Image (cartoon, rainbow, N blue to C red):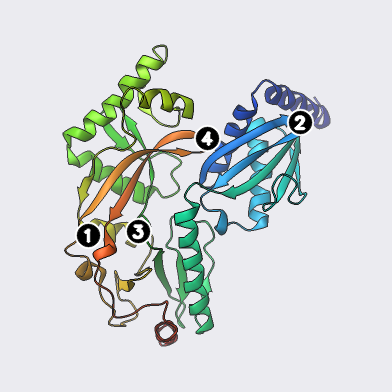
Amino acid sequence: MSELLKEYVKIILAEKVSESLSSNQVGQAIGNEITALGGDVSHVTCKGAGSKEGGHCRIFLNDLKEKSPADLMRLAKQSVEKAFGSRATVKNIGPVHSGRFDTYEVKSGGNVYNIVFSGGLTTGQRGGGYEYEGDVKRLLSSAGAKVEDVGADTTLSDVFLKTSSGKDVGIEVKGAGAKFGQPTLQYSYSSAEFMAPAASRSSQNALLVVDILNASQDVDLKKWMNSIKKSWDKLHPEDKMKVLGTQIQPKDWESMMRSGIGQSGPNISMDLDQIVTYYKKKKAHYIQIQGKGLYAFNDILKLGVTTFVDAAASLDAFIKPEILKSGGNKVLRASISLNYRTLAGSNMDLANPEDAQKFASALKKR
């Protein structure tokens, strides 16, 4: 079979696959592929998507502010290609389906997929965090620091800088009320253990959380996990749950919650040192918290800045397992939380131009 004929067959098959799916299924397929490609998908809504006439899917990204137009164009094109198995073309046709966000027109298999990327459900909280992160970067850059672009790499801390000798210095930046991490997990009912997904974008940190949850032996946590399986099995007796992964659709979860399941499990205590370990795995030496200041995990620049462990010693740290939406379906996520509203303020704050200058000067001396 010639290459041209092979491509024609792929186009016909892709067209048939797309037309056999509902608009929401098309959106779910695209959303799942965007998640696999590194996008933090909150949820997806579609109207008439995947038809010859067009329609559109709105992809809500929690990390939208980290994405450039080139990133979004790549995600739109590659997600359609991976979802439906046929080559695609993409172009930005402007704010056709939204007064604010551009539409990326993807053509594949004889069909048109108009994709609009919007901010995620957590935009109010995380969007403010991204804005604050941007402010910190601008202040450091204005002070002469070389700020590295790590893009949407969730395995690294938010801000990376270079010393004059070329060493990396990482700073985690937290807006007011932000979580201290929220990895996606899975749960095996045969072994009664939490697991890190094979495609986890931050596997080291996910494994750290998995180890804490598996070691907890919390009775209420086991009851909550078993209640999810029991409710699912009642709803789908033909497909009993062996592993909690990405199979719970929103409509299923609504039915399951009516049986009395809570969206969140119990708080599982963790040591403060484990939060430090979590961020050290992301190569963070410091953490900047909005309204509180800069703290050191490892004061590599010898600034004499307040250490995080000392400032937070009296605070309770915990992990809260939750069922949240991602890529169209419901998934298990573990929110690492610390009530740092009562955290003692630091002796240094990168939101202060003078302290940002002090930090930049320390980089030049190393």
| Real-space Cα separation, disc 3 to disc 1, in angstroms | 12 Å
Q: Quadrant of residue 240?
A: top left
Nearest to N terminus: mark 3 or mark 1: 1
Work out whether residue 315 or residue 110 is closer to the camera in this orientation and state it: 315
Q: Quadrant of residue 184?
A: top left
Q: Do the residues labelled 3 and 1 touch (CB within 8 Å)?
A: no
State the residue position of label 3: 281
| Real-space Cα separation, disc 1 to disc 4, in angstroms | 34 Å
Nearest to N terminus: mark 1 or mark 4: 1
Residue 178 at what x, y percent from top left?
A: 38, 57
Query: Which residue is drawn at the image coordinates 24% and 41% (left, top)?
Result: 213
| Real-space Cα separation, disc 3 to disc 4, in angstroms | 29 Å
State the residue position of label 4: 328
Q: Can residue 269 be seen in this view?
A: yes
| Real-space Cα separation, disc 2 to disc 4, in angstroms | 23 Å
Question: Label 4's element?
Answer: loop
Nearest to N terminus: mark 2 or mark 3: 2
Question: Label 1's element?
Answer: helix
Question: Label 2's element?
Answer: loop
The quadrant of the image that shows the C terminus is bottom left
**Label 3 crowding class (10 Å Cα cut-off): few <14, some 14-19, many 20+?**
some
Amino acid carrying mark 4 in the image: Gly
Amino acid carrying mark 3 in the image: Lys
State the residue position of label 2: 109
State the residue position of label 1: 273
Q: Which mark is in front, 2 or 4?
A: 4
